[in-house]
Image: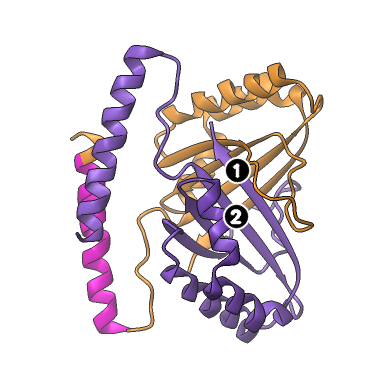
Chain colours: A purple, B orange
Amino acid sequence: MNNTRRKFIASSVTLAAGAVASVAAPAAPAKGKTPLVHHVFFWLKNPGSVADRDRIIEGLKTLRKIEAIKELRIGVVASTEKRDVVDNSWGVSELMFFEDLAGQASYQDHPIHQKFIKDCSHLWDKVIVYDAMDV
Amino acid sequence: MNNTRRKFIASSVTLAAGAVASVAAPAAPAKGKTPLVHHVFFWLKNPGSVADRDRIIEGLKTLRKIEAIKELRIGVVASTEKRDVVDNSWGVSELMFFEDLAGQASYQDHPIHQKFIKDCSHLWDKVIVYDAMDV
């Protein structure tokens, strides 16, 4: 089954679930299939190094092979307006979606993830992780 | 056009764009339609108040009417494993996806967003915003 077809079916299932929920409890939101959001920000040891940044990005791309990660976005700082509340001091971000806590836990221990940490952790100075569950 | 059909078409377009990109530049990733990620974390003035948290959540739900926001997830702290790098001190999160910088800028000024800030900002103590662009 290709990705397009899979996404199409997933959307249909979500919509169907939402329709049922709206009958049972009108105020309840329809939850998606990947409610666990795992967002990680990396601050580079050499903040100005595009080479180091790109090595982390390449390392993050290897994580796509991990089955438990249902979607992965790799990001750099966007050039939105400067505001006091916006933290733009980081270098690279990874945003992942999991089906559940077990999926995220299995990702932490996955050999490909461990290899990424082994290969790239010398390039970063600080990491902050935010794990959110959709309401 | 309903959402399912729109998502299906959007996926097809993304796949097609990816196919073209892979001919022109093999290493280039296929970019999605909403590459701008806007993730906001709110720390509550009364961290233990479920009522305050829920008022912010209800306020965030009103943002769904803003056209520029292509996807919105509202989250609370997930019960993942405790680790030094995981920040679980916040109370509510909003994760939004925009098509571009202009979309995000228009959201900032949107009356519904301004009303949310007016109605709910007394409930939070601190806000951190991360704006990432997919690579």
| Helix, strand or loop under label 1 | strand
Marked residue chain, label 1: A
Disc 1 designates what residue?
Answer: A132
Disc 2 designates what residue?
Answer: A39
Left or right of B53? Residue A61 is: left
**Residue B64 horizontal/vertical position (percent):** 45, 30
Left or right of B61? Residue B3 is: left
User: Three-letter amino acid code at disc 2?
Assistant: His
Residue A107, located in which quarter of the rendered image? bottom right
Q: Are marks 2 and 1 in contact (CB under 8 Å)?
A: yes
* Residue at 44% in and 54% down: B100
Callout 2: few (<14), some (14-19), or many (20+) C-alpha neighbours within 10 Å?
many
Is B124 placed above or below B14 here?
Answer: above
Segment colored magenta = B5-25
Residue B21, located in which quarter of the rendered image? bottom left
* Residue at 52% in and 45% down: A36
| Helix, strand or loop under label 2 | strand
Identify the image quadrant of the N terminus of chain A.
bottom left
Callout 1: few (<14), some (14-19), or many (20+) C-alpha neighbours within 10 Å?
many
Give the CA separation, mark 2 to mark 1: 8 Å
The answer, for residue B132, to whether it is visible in the render is no
User: Three-letter amino acid code at disc 1?
Assistant: Ala
Would you say the magenta stretch is mainly helix, strand or loop?
A: helix
B88 or B135: nearer the viewer = B88
**Residue A106 horizontal/vertical position (percent):** 54, 59
B44 or B69: nearer the viewer = B44
Q: Which mark is residue A88?
A: none
Marked residue chain, label 2: A
**Residue A5 horizontal/vertical position (percent):** 20, 53
Residue B24, located in which quarter of the rendered image? bottom left
